[in-house]
Image (cartoon, rainbow, N blue to C red):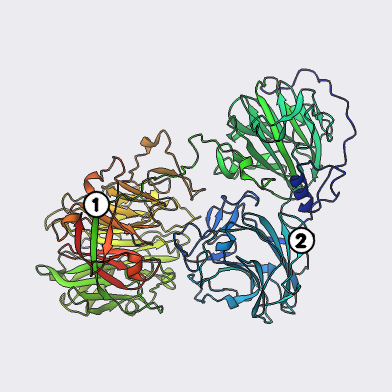
């Protein structure tokens, strides 16, 4: 067998008495050991282990390691703002290494301008709530990346549904929702004391980890604060006058049922903050530390450069040595070296007791192939592989294996010439191990195997504590093994890097990790300038001085155009705007027509689109998209079987006007299509008819429907790739037909899946996340779809019948990993076998936040834009273009170019200045003559592009 021990027991050196195992009562001992670069020994540390959180009354609210990467929305007890810019409260494994694995990251720095309400969140405490007469404690850890740019309020609230500013509670953002709370800003930690603020005497530094205990007397409406640095001893925090007791911001007689995070809304911050290990003791006044802490860290720095045997309780073969770290010769570090067949070393470590869950951490390095195992055992004098219990292993390959009962299971890779960190979280009740790694192929702390929730069985079940580290080389181990930073947490799943330095875990680019900058291209200069003038400002409908307009198109007239522009407001009205004067008339209002009409939680909800039948001037037919919820979820049946967790319906309605030339609608309507979506984001988007067709063409009068996936992080469904589901598709239907479901529409005979019994005949293209906008090139009829991506890439695709864009296995020409939505990965070698279609234009986050598609001007009033696909960035309002001649399906990504703006007077401007806000919410429109318009969705303003020039 590979890895077998020597045939006969090897002689062992004489043992000195094993030392009493040191276990740090508090992380202060751990910090001291790290700062002094000395191993923790019996003479240096107290003998009691870290506190058992349950014994001290603490129970976890959120530890985050088992949460999915991405938005905190709908995970555990959490509530956050609506998707998009106001969100920003995410679970991230990119958290500082001093925290334990994943953390709640309030990500504000990734936006070019601060966004109001971004990153706000609250958690329902449930049975962890502090009752009206209780004294309890809330504990959390935090790391602030840039304290000077931070403005985060943290505390408890008596409001069970506090407003976050852009959420769905209907409650307003109000700092007075806080009872006890502290503020983290450029002053450090500041305690709210009734109407006053008390800067605390704790010095807070960027990048450092702190623990905070807020001891709350809910009967007296007062609280105290204790703070510890990097897991050290908690110290009372005092105000400028020495005060340690502070009054609630808002007093009352109610329970405190929510943990609340609110960023400063008056001066929105831009610094990132990371929180972890949020615990509550709802009826206990305690400064015990419930967070994971290593009871012992052995870093070998104070060891002699000599044989390991006999040093600090180690038993080892003579050739196992302590050496200067050969991988970092410029640093004064020491590590253990094991080079040779059959070498072994073991040492007593703090016990992970029977029935407990604890963690073993170590760093390992190899320079060549090794046959070696490292792990834990209960055997006092282990000598063979059979003595292993929790066991990591390599067998002369780059595979990293873990013992799983009576065999090994490959869990990951172990590249050579890099320090790789390994965590073994041992459940000594269930006799299982969860494996994690950082470094090597993993930039962040990653559960192994990647994307799985594997529990490895111990090599042999035990009914006693695991209290000895054991390393053993097999009979054919030629390479050099280095080991460092051995650490044990007796009570917790602890995914901290003991030193707090992520650089201790060295990343190797094996070509399979995430792509750091998937789209390096940025906009090129072009010399194109657009001149704009304001056409209209539509009435306020949102209660904040604006409207939510989404599109501009021209109402068809008998001879083409009618001089009337149609502008839907997501808040309900459909306006007709005079093309010359800008005068607006309300044509109809969805609130008057649909009892279950909804416009919250904003973004895509409401009256989204209008599309006029090519024959509208004669037949009076046009189509709208709107959203419904409430009773509609129970009383109305979607056209196709909806997801089990449907929260909203997208509805296509056909309207028939009695008089197509009237300024106010009268006539009939009927429902054409209804689709259920799991989430409010990425629902039904644009609808439209191909304007390049003429009567008699096969595509004439067929309605295209862009249907989003209805998903949001971390809830990814298989629907986009399933041709038998309507989500994540572009659909094509015939409103005048009757062979579709319920006879409400027809299915065009030319649709690509019409003869496939396992697909919906309506499907025209699939594999889409959010097909936000589409258009056609009037010259050759090619259809372009603008797609908003997840975190990394936005793209424009050329869509042909049956194309599959690959979401959520692909994003923008890269592999997408649903367990790591913040990144994209290289395509696999067999990618061609999947038949996915990739973008003709792609933008990374270095070029914007969210792409909005536009139009391809041809033969109209803008020669400088001839044959150029105009698009932009929703948030910044920056306008770009790409040449359609370079937008070739299957070819290289087309370059894209900057566009400058000037106002009516010819003075340079930009969309932020025009819109009067940092988030422009850019949209485009076009009239029958090819005239172009730009819109600010959020404030109801429309500008006409009056000229386009090119230097």
- Where is residue 556, by image quadrant? bottom left
Which is more toward the observer, 792 or 229?
229
Disc 1 or 2, which lies upstream in sequence?
Answer: 2
> Dot 2, how many residues are within 10 Å of its Cα: few (below 14), some (14-19), or many (20+)?
many
Q: Is residue 196 visible?
A: yes
Which is more toward the observer, 820 or 593?
820
* SS state under label 1: strand
The residue that disc 2 covers is: 234
**Residue at 21% from the left image edge and 45% from the top image edge:** 885
* SS state under label 2: loop
The answer to whether the residue labelled 1 contacts the one labelled 2, judged by CB atoms less than 8 Å apart, is no
Give percent across and percent down for residue 30: 76, 48
The residue that disc 1 covers is: 783
Q: Nearer the viewer, mark 1 or mark 2?
A: 2
Give percent across and percent down for residue 678: 45, 61
Which is more toward the observer, 388 or 539?
539
Which is more toward the observer, 630 or 818?
818
Residue 667 as seen in the image, left or right of residue 298: left
């Amino acid at each position: 067998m590979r890895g077998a021990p020597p045939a006969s027991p090897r002689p062992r050196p004489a043992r000195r008495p094993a030392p009493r195992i040191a276990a740090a009562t508090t992380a202060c001992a751990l910090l001291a050991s790290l700062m002094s670069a000395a191993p923790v020994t019996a003479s240096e540390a107290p003998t009691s282990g870290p506190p058992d959180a349950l014994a001290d009354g603490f129970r976890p609210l959120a530890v985050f390691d088992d949460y999915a990467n991405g938005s905190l929305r709908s995970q555990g007890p959490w509530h956050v703002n609506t998707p998009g810019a106001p969100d920003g409260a995410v679970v991230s494994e990119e958290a500082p290494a001093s925290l334990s694995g994943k953390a709640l990251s309030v990500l504000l720095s990734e936006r070019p301008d601060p966004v109001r309400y971004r990153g706000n969140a609250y958690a329902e405490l449930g049975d962890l709530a502090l009752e009206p007469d209780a004294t309890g404690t809330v504990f959390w850890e935090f790391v602030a990346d840039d304290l000077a740019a931070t403005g985060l309020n943290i505390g408890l609230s008596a409001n069970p549904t506090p407003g976050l500013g852009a959420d769905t509670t209907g409650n307003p953002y109000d700092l007075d929702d806080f009872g006890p709370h502290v503020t983290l800003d450029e002053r450090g930690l500041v305690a709210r004391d009734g109407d006053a603020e008390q800067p605390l005497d704790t010095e807070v530094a960027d990048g450092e980890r702190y623990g905070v205990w807020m001891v709350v007397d809910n009967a007296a409406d007062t609280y105290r604060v204790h703070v510890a640095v990097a897991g050290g001893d908690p110290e009372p925090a005092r105000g400028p006058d020495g005060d340690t007791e502070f009054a609630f911001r808002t007093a009352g007689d109610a329970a405190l049922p929510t943990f609340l995070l609110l960023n400063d809304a008056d001066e929105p911050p831009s610094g990132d903050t990371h929180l972890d290990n949020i615990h509550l003791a709802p009826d206990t006044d305690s400064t015990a530390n419930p967070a994971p802490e290593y009871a012992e860290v052995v870093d070998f720095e104070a060891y002699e450069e000599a044989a390991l045997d006999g040093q600090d309780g180690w038993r080892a073969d003579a050739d196992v040595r302590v050496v200067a770290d050969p991988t970092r010769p410029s640093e004064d570090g020491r590590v253990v070296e094991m080079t040779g067949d059959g070498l072994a070393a073991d040492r007593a470590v703090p016990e992970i007791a029977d029935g407990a869950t604890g963690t073993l951490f170590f760093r390992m390095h190899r320079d060549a192939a090794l046959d070696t195992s490292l792990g834990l055992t209960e055997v006092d004098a282990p000598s063979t592989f059979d003595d292993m219990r929790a066991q990591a292993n390599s067998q002369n390959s780059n595979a990293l294996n873990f013992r799983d009962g009576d065999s090994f299971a490959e869990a990951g890779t172990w590249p050579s010439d890099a320090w790789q960190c390994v965590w073994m979280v041992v459940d000594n009740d269930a006799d299982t191990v969860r494996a994690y790694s950082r470094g090597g192929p993993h930039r962040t702390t990653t559960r192994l195997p990647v994307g799985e929730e594997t529990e490895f069985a111990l090599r042999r079940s035990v009914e006693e504590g695991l209290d000895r580290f054991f390393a053993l080389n097999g009979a054919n181990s030629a390479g050099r093994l280095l080991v460092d930073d051995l650490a044990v947490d007796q009570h917790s799943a602890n995914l901290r890097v003991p030193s707090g330095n992520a650089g201790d875990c060295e990343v190797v680019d094996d070509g399979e990790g995430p792509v750091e900058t998937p789209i390096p291209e940025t906009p090129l200069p072009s010399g194109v300038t657009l001149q704009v003038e304001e056409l209209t400002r539509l009435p306020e409908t949102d209660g904040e001085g604006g409207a939510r307009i989404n599109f501009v198109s021209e109402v068809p007239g008998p001879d083409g155009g009618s001089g009337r522009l149609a502008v839907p407001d997501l808040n309900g009205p459909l306006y007709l705007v005079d093309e010359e004067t800008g005068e607006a008339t309300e044509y109809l209002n969805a609130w008057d027509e649909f009892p279950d009409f909804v416009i919250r939680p904003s973004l895509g909800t409401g009256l989204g689109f209008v599309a006029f039948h090519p024959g509208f001037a004669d037949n009076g037919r046009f189509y709208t998209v709107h959203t419904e919820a409430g009773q509609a979820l129970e009383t109305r049946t979607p056209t196709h079987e909806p997801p089990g967790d449907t929260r909203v319906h997208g509805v296509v309605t056909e309207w028939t006007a009695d008089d197509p030339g009237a300024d106010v609608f009268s006539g009939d309507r009927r429902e054409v299509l209804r689709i259920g979506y799991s989430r409010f984001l990425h629902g039904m988007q644009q609808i439209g008819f191909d304007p390049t067709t003429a009567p008699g063409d096969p595509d004439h009068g067929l309605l295209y429907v862009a249907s989003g996936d209805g998903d949001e992080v971390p809830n990814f469904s298989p629907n986009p790739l399933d041709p038998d589901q309507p989500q994540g598709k572009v659909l094509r239907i015939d409103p005048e037909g009757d062979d579709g479901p319920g006879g409400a529409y027809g299915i065009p005979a030319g649709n690509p899946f019409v003869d496939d019994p396992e697909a919906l005949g309506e499907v025209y293209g699939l594999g889409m996340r959010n097909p936000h906008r589409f258009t056609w090139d009037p010259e050759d009829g090619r259809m372009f779809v603008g797609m908003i991506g997840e975190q990394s890439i936005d793209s424009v695709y050329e869509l042909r019948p049956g194309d599959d864009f690959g979401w959520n296995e692909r994003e923008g020409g890269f592999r997408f990993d649903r367990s790591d939505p913040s990144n994209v990965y290289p395509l696999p070698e067999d990618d061609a076998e999947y038949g996915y279609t990739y973008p003709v234009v792609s933008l990374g986050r270095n070029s914007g936040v969210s792409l909005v598609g536009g139009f391809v001007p041809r033969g109209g009033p803008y020669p400088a834009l001839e044959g150029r696909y105009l698009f932009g960035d929703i948030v910044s309002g920056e306008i770009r273009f790409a040449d359609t001649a370079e937008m070739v399906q299957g070819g290289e990504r087309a370059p894209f170019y900057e566009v400058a703006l000037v106002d009516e007077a010819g003075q340079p401007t930009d969309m932020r200045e025009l819109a009067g806000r940092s988030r422009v919410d850019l949209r485009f429109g076009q009239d029958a003559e090819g005239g172009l318009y730009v819109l600010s969705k959020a404030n109801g303003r429309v500008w006409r592009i009056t000229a386009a020039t090119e230097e």
